Amino acid sequence: MVSGVTPTEPAAWLAELTAGVATWSTTDEHTAAAGADRSGTRQAGLPSVVVYAHTVADVVHTLTVAHRHRVPVVTRGAGSGLAGGATAGSTAIVLDLASMNRIVEISPVDGLARVEPGVITADLDRAAAGHGLFYAPDPGSVAISTIGGNIATNAGGLRGAKYGVTRDAVLALDVVLADGTVVHTGRDTVKGVTGYDLTALFVGSEGTLGVVVGATVRLLPRPKGQATAAAYFSSVDAAARASVLLATLGVRPAVVELVDGRTLAAIDDLRGTDHATRGAAFLLVQTDGFGAIAEIEVVAESLRQSALSVEVSADAALALALAAARRDALPAIEARGRVLIEDIAVPRSRLAEAFEAVTEISERTGIEIYQFAHAGDGNLHPIIVIPPGFAATEIPAHVQAAADEIFALALRLGGTLTAEHGIGRLKAAWVEREVGPEAHRLMRGIRALFDPRGILNPGTSV
Amino acid sequence: MVSGVTPTEPAAWLAELTAGVATWSTTDEHTAAAGADRSGTRQAGLPSVVVYAHTVADVVHTLTVAHRHRVPVVTRGAGSGLAGGATAGSTAIVLDLASMNRIVEISPVDGLARVEPGVITADLDRAAAGHGLFYAPDPGSVAISTIGGNIATNAGGLRGAKYGVTRDAVLALDVVLADGTVVHTGRDTVKGVTGYDLTALFVGSEGTLGVVVGATVRLLPRPKGQATAAAYFSSVDAAARASVLLATLGVRPAVVELVDGRTLAAIDDLRGTDHATRGAAFLLVQTDGFGAIAEIEVVAESLRQSALSVEVSADAALALALAAARRDALPAIEARGRVLIEDIAVPRSRLAEAFEAVTEISERTGIEIYQFAHAGDGNLHPIIVIPPGFAATEIPAHVQAAADEIFALALRLGGTLTAEHGIGRLKAAWVEREVGPEAHRLMRGIRALFDPRGILNPGTSV
């Protein structure tokens, strides 16, 4: 958190700001909507103004004015963040980039796309598909979140272990710095080592180092062929151990998803299915590419050593049916009440232990926690259902205490607080415990270098 | 380049330095050897002392003393760098990490290894193979270069397009900062977004931000199966175009290597082979994994549209024979004289143009330039043979002028000065032209933040 922001009253800068941008609003309706993200949390008060940027010039003007007058700026895309990284309180400017949503170029030969930050991630992938390509990172929010938001949080997804996360997909960025300076980072080539890797520095920085106004991203050949294995196990422990064994077989599954028994029961409640009668945990494995079928056969043979049942299919429609227990997981949990979605990652070898420890937290505290995991990269989503009777923007103290226990667990197991959702405001107090005081000091030094007046998303990230 | 280093005389700090480390030397023989890398270039004078570090404590002590007395420190591993990134001149301390070469741990389940920086890259890969894993980055120097050096230059290799470069393989680092502080960056998981990506910042920073004393790197399942296609073309242009087409076929070759006709003739001279009679350019494509054979068939069918000949094999011994024209390329060129190895990358769509323009530079200037490329990622190595009659540590002015033309060409084609060898001292004057003044200012700001006294590898990198 960078301190030292003592914004002047809106009157002093609002006229100057709004004179230079085409679309903006100060109505309570708009500022209230622009001040919240999907974490459900809010800061005190409403932001002063929302700027709906359509051009780089809008962003430059906004930051120039904000910098001059030391006004906090919170950048947002779709507002789909889960960590409070795009909430804005009183006196802040919200800089909304959702309208900067052009796919500027797709080059199949160079394997890249140039996009504005407001492009919906699924829209980019759909456009790439038209050229036989795909955009690899596939966060759960892919249908609603933007590339800019994905860059801000270094979003991951189901295919992270095989195809990487957002950082691996971003080649170059156009960024407006806190003082309005425009900078280009990176290059159009996969390789390159001229100077320091500023691109990677901006990825995951949650709007605290600059505002991304353009990105050059990698597109890969869309995998030919896909095969799916779905298995039920007698326990989460058995399923986790089976998922970990896959790492030693020479296969590279695109997807390895684990769903716990409590979540299976919630799906059955919602859909009238019978998942919970088939096992106490579910594992979904997908392979892709020219060797998909050969790979899934190796996978299935391994799963059969410990699973209650294993089904395999290379047929797209059947595969979709097999994946239902994973696809319905979040909707089924959200049907139980308001959720707080956690996002730890642990080394794969500790995954079974992590599931067990979260279950123990749930049982001891009486707080409902459901779990599913991108098991291939050790990324576990414990999902806490917040009991009724609390304000919609509040995280009750005993729920926060359970979340804190989960963070501590992740660190104890050699893992991380957040694999792909970001620190936001909700986990900012925990950053130093994960990275240590020396790395934290370097990070804060970098932040002060890039944003000496501390106007960019204060209270968020490092 | 960070200025402001005004080192005190050795006498003032040498006793303090050598009292705290077990192994060091001030003999001319040792300091001369430690002051040069494989670029062949030298700085004026000899370094004052070489510290052969065996422990983190040795590195901490060395940097603590150097920081206190403002003495320049040049860190080296195998000294295999090609860009003058590990040369040291008068009064400098050379910090040699080659003896810190333990593979501390290999975890097949977590898919990672913990290594000291002096581990030879091929040794790590060999150890990984014992567990059915591999270390993906495979720079040409793999048999002699160290992981620490690979990290310093973000080394690439033949498999970059499919498996990534060093940055993609490094999960976490232990780094000693300029003032002797030890910091840990990153984590043991593939995903993670707690704080800024300091790991990526250190990768490629050429010893200017800190000294890497430990690394946690990713190991991937060793690909099962491999297939090779070797094709000769009537021109480099035809071969480059054919290589670019591969990107649109849905395949992901592990290796796409292009060798020009002049290099083929040099190989024939050296080995008595007949490559040049078979074509004016050679393309080697390798696929791997469960779908290797199916993929190579798609590749071969495409190559046959424009090649003079295409041979395919999934047999390891035959594949080795097919790859001879690529494997012999550098030895054949080095047999012609002392070489200056350039390392540009361009977007794949500009590869044919880059080959042609380099050939034009060679013909116009009369300087011998040979070319081969990691075509899959647009990484072209123009190799200049320095005419006889110049000192072994000198780059003649007309050769430097040709190199400068190649740099300018790379930038004109939207590419980079250096794909995988680093900036070192040889390209430092070109950095700002590639990254622009604003990004350069940020990079130099980061450098000053991490190394306020400017003692780390002055004159190198940004």
Image: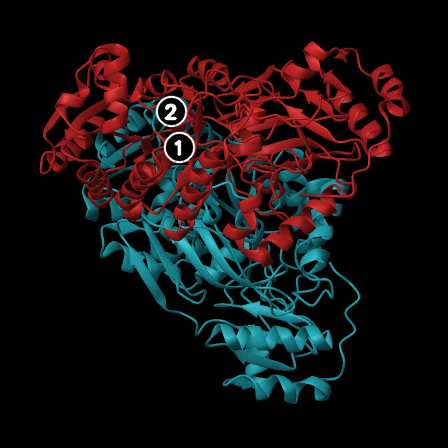
Chain colours: A red, B cyan
Q: CA distance from mark 2 to mark 1?
A: 7 Å
Q: Amino acid at mark 2?
A: Ser
Q: Residue at x 11, y 37 (%)?
A: A306
Vertical relation: B400 (above or below) B347:
below
Circle number at residue B306: 2
Relative horizontal placement of residue B280, taking residue B7 as reference (left or right): left
Element under disc 1: strand
Q: Amino acid at mark 1?
A: Phe
Circle number at residue A29: none
Residue B363 placement: quadrant: top right
Circle number at residue B233: 1
Chain of the residue displaying label 1: B
Relative horizontal placement of residue B289, taking residue B73 as reference (left or right): left
Relative horizontal placement of residue A309, taking residue B382 as reference (left or right): left
Residue B42 visible, this angle: yes
Q: Residue at x 37, y 69 (%)?
A: B102
Vertical relation: B251 (above or below) A324:
below
| Horizontal and vertical percent position of residue B56 | 49, 72
